[in-house]
């Protein structure tokens, strides 16, 4: 299975407008944030669109744990992209402006978690509590920094070779076995959705343009 960061680069809906519902008469409940630990130095804080590597544990209000990345994910930390409703809206709000090495406790009201319907073992109208440790911050797949990393010859457009080379580096970084067929399929998907003018290149405009879907 591919790391979350690789999956995100060509399958997520890249929109950073959160579109949170609000009411003019009844203020919406928000996330309560408690900082449990902060690093001595903070070189970068999270922003919308960043990819975050986290360990977390989720609890009900009575203290019962319902999930833990340490126990339920083979002990592996989890990648997700901040600000695109990939997980909970409460995470998108509660993990902003966070430093690598920081730990937070989030108390998320039902409206920013699984709401009236619930999900799986989460009952409807559940307030959820998460303890989250941020391990790493990476540029999101639609950042200008990511484009520059991929644009090896600085010509402001991405060739199939450059995209494939970027994917190869990502595979190497996460020690994922190389799979030429899978990489070729990923490149095909990327160009199918991103190369609007079908000239065989992804321009900087095409890369950063907000699509409805990928």
Image (cartoon, grey):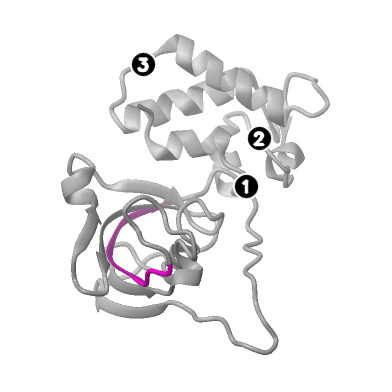
Write down the region rendered in magenta: 125-137
In this rendered view, identify the residue nearer to me: 150 or 50: 50
In the picture, the quarter occupied by the N terminus is top left
Mark 3 and mark 1: Cα distance apart in space: 26 Å
User: How many numbered marks are there?
Assistant: 3
Where does the image place residue 148, in percent across and percent down from the top left?
59, 41
Q: Which mark is residue 114?
A: none
Where does the image place residue 177, in percent across and percent down from the top left?
31, 18
Residue on which disc 2 sits? 214
Q: Quadrant of residue 203?
A: top right
Where does the image place residue 74, in percent across and percent down from the top left?
19, 39
Name the outermost residue toward the bottom. Answer: 25
Is 192 colored magenta in this rendering? Answer: no
- Circle 1 packing at 10 Å, graded few (<14), some (14-19), many (20+), is many
Is 54 positioned to the left or the right of 181 in the image?
left
Mark 2 and mark 1: Cα distance apart in space: 8 Å
| SS for dot 1 | loop
Mark 2 and mark 3: Cα distance apart in space: 24 Å
**Which one is earlier in the sequence, the residue at label 3 or at label 1?**
1
Is 191 positioned to the left or the right of 205 in the image?
left
Residue on which disc 3 sits? 178
In the picture, the quarter occupied by the C terminus is top right
Q: Which residue is at 41% across, 53% downward?
A: 119
Compared to 207, does 122 lie above or below? Answer: below
């Amino acid at each position: 299975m591919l790391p979350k960061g690789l999956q995100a680069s060509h399958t997520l809906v890249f929109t950073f407008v959160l579109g949170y519902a609000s009411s003019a008469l009844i203020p919406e409940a928000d996330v309560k944030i408690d900082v449990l630990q902060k690093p001595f130095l903070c070189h970068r804080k999270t922003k919308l669109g960043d990819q975050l590597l986290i360990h977390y544990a989720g609890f009900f209000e009575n203290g019962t744990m319902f999930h833990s990345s340490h126990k339920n994910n083979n002990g592996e930390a989890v990648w997700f992209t901040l600000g695109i409703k990939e997980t909970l809206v409460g995470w998108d709000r509660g993990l902003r402006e966070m430093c690598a090495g920081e730990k937070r406790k989030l108390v998320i009201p039902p409206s920013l978690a699984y709401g009236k319907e619930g999900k799986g073992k989460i009952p409807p109208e559940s307030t959820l509590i998460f303890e989250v440790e941020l391990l790493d911050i990476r540029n999101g797949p639609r950042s200008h920094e990511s484009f520059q990393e991929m644009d090896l010859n600085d010509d402001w457009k991405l060739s199939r070779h450059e995209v494939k080379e970027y994917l190869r580096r990502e595979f190497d970084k996460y020690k994922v076995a190389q799979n030429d067929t899978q990489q070729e399929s990923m490149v095909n998907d990327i160009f199918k959705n991103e190369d609007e003018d079908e000239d065989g290149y992804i321009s900087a405009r095409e890369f950063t343009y907000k699509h409805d879907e990928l």
